[in-house]
Amino acid sequence: MTADSPAPPPFRLLRSPPPRVRRQKRDSELTGETASALLYMISTGSATNRADLARTLGLPPSTITGKINELLDASLVEEVGKGDPTGGRRPRILQLREDAGVMLAADLGRNHARLALLNMSGGILCTESIAISIGSGPEKVLGLVADALRALLATAGQPTVRGVGVCIPGPVDVAKGMVESPASMPGWHRFDVVDWLAAEFDTVAVVDNDANMMGLGEYAYLARQAQATSVKYKSMLYLKAGTSIGCGIVIDGHVYRGATALAGDIAHVRVAAAGERPCGCGNRGCLETVVGGAGIGDELRKAGVPVRDIFDIVRLAQDSDVRATTRTRAAGRLVGDTLAAIVNFFNPEVVVLGGLLSTVEPFVAAIRSQLYESCHPLATTSLRIQQSAAGIDAGVLGVGQLCLRKALSEL
Ligand SMILES: [Zn+2]
C-alpha cells in the first residue's frame, strides 16, 4: 500500500444473523443407515437398550428413540424385559424379532452366481452357488436366480421377504435400477432389473455393480470385526480381480459411484502392455484384456496350456505351474502399476484385494510390491494392503447392506 492509498475500512463485527443452513434431504442409503446400525448392534448384543445405543452411535437419545419406535412399529425388534438399573430406571432390553424376515441377495458373475439369505441385521443365514451364463440375457439369468432363491427360502421355512437385490459385472445406474452399456452382456442394456425383481418377489429391490457391492460388503465385514479389533477404516479401495476386473470405492460406509456410475472402472484404463488388443467395451488396449481371467486364459491357451476358465488358472497357479504362475505374476504387476496412480490420487487407508485371482499369492505379491515401488511414500506410509476377509461372500454381504438400507428407508 502506498502513502496515498485511502485507509481501508475498519473491520466490523457482523451483526446480522448468519444465513440459515438448509438441511439437505438425505438419500435412501443415508436414511436407512442409522436403522441398519441399530439393528446390527441389537442383533449382536453389543448394545441392547436406548441409552447404550445412543452412546455407541454418538447420536441424540431423541433420534434413537424415534428410530427404535419405527423398528418396533415395523415388527423388526421387540422389547423383552428390563436390564440392570444404571443410576435410575431399569432400561428396556431390545432384541431382533425371530420373525423379522429375511433379505435375498445374488452376486452374478459371468459363469456363476453366489446367492444368500440374510437376516435383518445383514448377517448371512445360508448360501448357495449356481451356474449361469450372463450372456444368455437378463430374463433367463434372473429367472434361474429367482428359482434358486425360492429354493433357499423353502429350506429356511418360508420367512417373510423384506428385500431382494443383485449385483452384476457391469456399470449400473442405481437410481434408475438399470444396467448401462455392459460389455459382453447382450440384452442387459437398460433392462429394468429393480422392476423385474420387485415384481417377482413383491418387495423392495436393488441392483448395483459387483465391485461396488463387494467393497460395501467388505467394509461392513471389517466394521463388524472392528468392534473386536478397534481397527476402523474410513476410506477403502476394493479391487475385484476375477474373469473381469473392477474397483469399488467406499468412503465412510458409502459407495462412491461417480457422475455416471463409472467410478472405479479400472478395467478400461489403457495400458501400453495391452497394445492394440480389442476389448469388449469397443476400445483397444484396455487393462482388462491382459489382466482379467479371460485375458490370462487366452494367453495361456496360446502357449499351449489347456485352461478352460479362471478356476483352471487359479488351480494351476496354486499348484505352482510355472507358466500360470509367471502369467498371473505379470498380471499382478500391471494391475499394481495402474492401481498405484489411483492410490496416489485417492490416498485410501486400505486397499483390499478380492476376487478369485486374489487368492493366488504371486498375483497379490506383485500388486503389493508394485504399489510400494510406484506410490508416493506418503501414500504408503500407513496404507494397508490386504486380501479380502469376506472372501466369496463380499458381494452378497454388500447387496444385503444396500437392500437393508433401502428397506429401512421405506418404513
Ligand atoms: Zn475396454
Image (cartoon, helix red, strand yellow):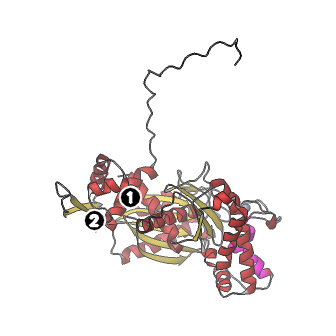
- Residue 40 seen in the figure: yes
Which secondary structure lies at badge 1? helix
- 15 and 108: which is toward the camera: 15
Q: Nearer the viewer, residue 279 or 187?
A: 279
Q: CA distance from mark 1 to mark 2?
A: 16 Å
Q: Residue at x 67, y 75 (%)?
A: 365
Residue 193 horizontal/vertical position (percent): 52, 59
Q: Which residue is mark 1?
A: 37
Q: Within the magenta stretch, is there residue 299?
A: yes
Horizontal side of 385 relative to 406 (left or right) equals right
Front residue of this view, candidates 129 and 71: 71
> Quadrant of residue 140 in the image?
bottom right
Q: Amino acid at mark 1?
A: Ala
Relative horizontal placement of residue 244, taking residue 326 as reference (left or right): left
Disc 2 marks which residue? Answer: 97
On screen, residue 21 above or below 130: above
Q: Could you tell me which residue is drawn at 68 percent across and 78 percent down?
A: 362
Which region is colored magenta?
287-301
Q: Amino acid at mark 2?
A: Arg
Q: Residue furthest left?
A: 89
Residue at 57%, 64% in the rendered image: 210
The reply to whether residue 106 is visible in this rendering is: no
SS for dot 2: loop
